[in-house]
Image (tube, rainbow, N blue to C red):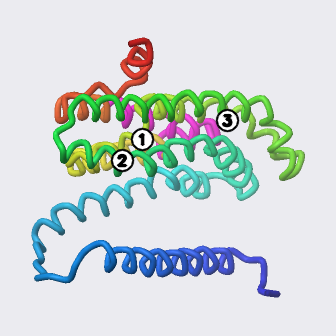
Amino acid sequence: AGWPLTATTAVGAAIASTWVTSVIQAIFIQRRLSREIPVGPVAHDSRLWFTTALPIWFISACELVLQNVDVLVLARYLAADAVGIYYAALKTISLIAFVGYAVGSAQSSRLSAQNARGDREGLIASVHDAVNWTFWPSLAGAILLLLLGRPLLGLFGPEFESGYPAMFVLVIGLLVRAAVGPAEFMLRMLGAQTQCAYVLGGSAILSVVLNLALVPVYGILGAAAATSLALVAATIAFAIVARRTLGIDITIVSAALSLRR
């Protein structure tokens, strides 16, 4: 369109694309609902809506903190070129995180339906399927991205290859995180959204503290270590919450054993 290639243009394009796709989605959903659900009396439970929606909103906010605090702290202490190198390494290795997002989006409605029907056996099987479909493709993707890491970073410029060691540190947290599958989706769909919010809130705070402590001393590797440690802490907390609240072992060990049965 001839617009300037600036961050403002990029953000504007992202906002516009989000609104356009959301409106189109809403139109299709409303048309489908009008055909499937007959017109009848309308009732609203605002208290239930808020108590359900607020933790989910908080989860989204904490995820934004976890995704960006390392870059923000780096920008505070290091030069712009170092921030750019880290950002390229982070976004390249973080491609494996899309596996969990895709699996969670695909499985969430099934988990909710099985939970509503009281199908405990089917629910546990679906949870283990989600964990397996998240971890093993993430592991394969991580190996591939690490093998191609230097050439991929080199596409941004030869100086970006210096961010390659950070990818090894970041991948540890991402793979540990994948070891409990799309935990956020599972907890939210099974009624444990409040506990999920507590976990991500604590992880976001931990990430801020660790980045402020490690980045001034270790630079890019400090940011990578802080991010990985926050993800590891979140993973452990998710596993504990799922076990205590839902009575389900969501770790890859349990999921892998289920494949043998």
Specify the amino acid type for callout 3.
Met
Q: Could you say which quadrant of the image residue 252 lies in?
A: top left
**Could you tell me residue 167's position as x and y percent?**
67, 35
Which residue is located at x 46 percent, y 34 percent?
A: 177
In the image, is 127 to the left or to the right of 55? right
Q: Mark 3, mark 1: which one is toward the viewer?
A: 1
The residue labelled by disc 2 is 185
| Residue underneath mark 3 | 167
Q: Residue at x 52, y 48 (%)?
A: 102
Please state which of residues 218 and 159 is positioned toward the viewer in this rendering.
Answer: 159
The residue sitting at the right extreme is: 158
Residue 93 in which image quadrant? top right
Q: Measured from the top left, where is residue 106 in percent x and y?
A: 45, 49
Residue sitting at 25 percent across and 74 percent down?
Answer: 37
Q: Give the labeled residue for mark 1.
A: 182
The quadrant the N terminus occupies is bottom right
Magenta-drawn segment: 212-236
Amino acid type, mark 2: Phe
Question: Nearer the N terminus, badge 2 or badge 3?
Answer: 3
Q: Which residue is drawn at 75% across and 36% down?
A: 164
Separation (CA) of disc 2 from disc 3: 26 Å
Residue 117: x percent and y percent?
18, 44
99 to the left or right of 41: right
What residue type is disc 1 on? Pro
Q: Distance between the residues labelled 3 and 1?
A: 22 Å
- In the rendered structure, are the residues bearing label 2 and label 1 in contact, judged by CB atoms less than 8 Å apart? yes
Residue 14's spot in the image, x, y percent? 60, 74
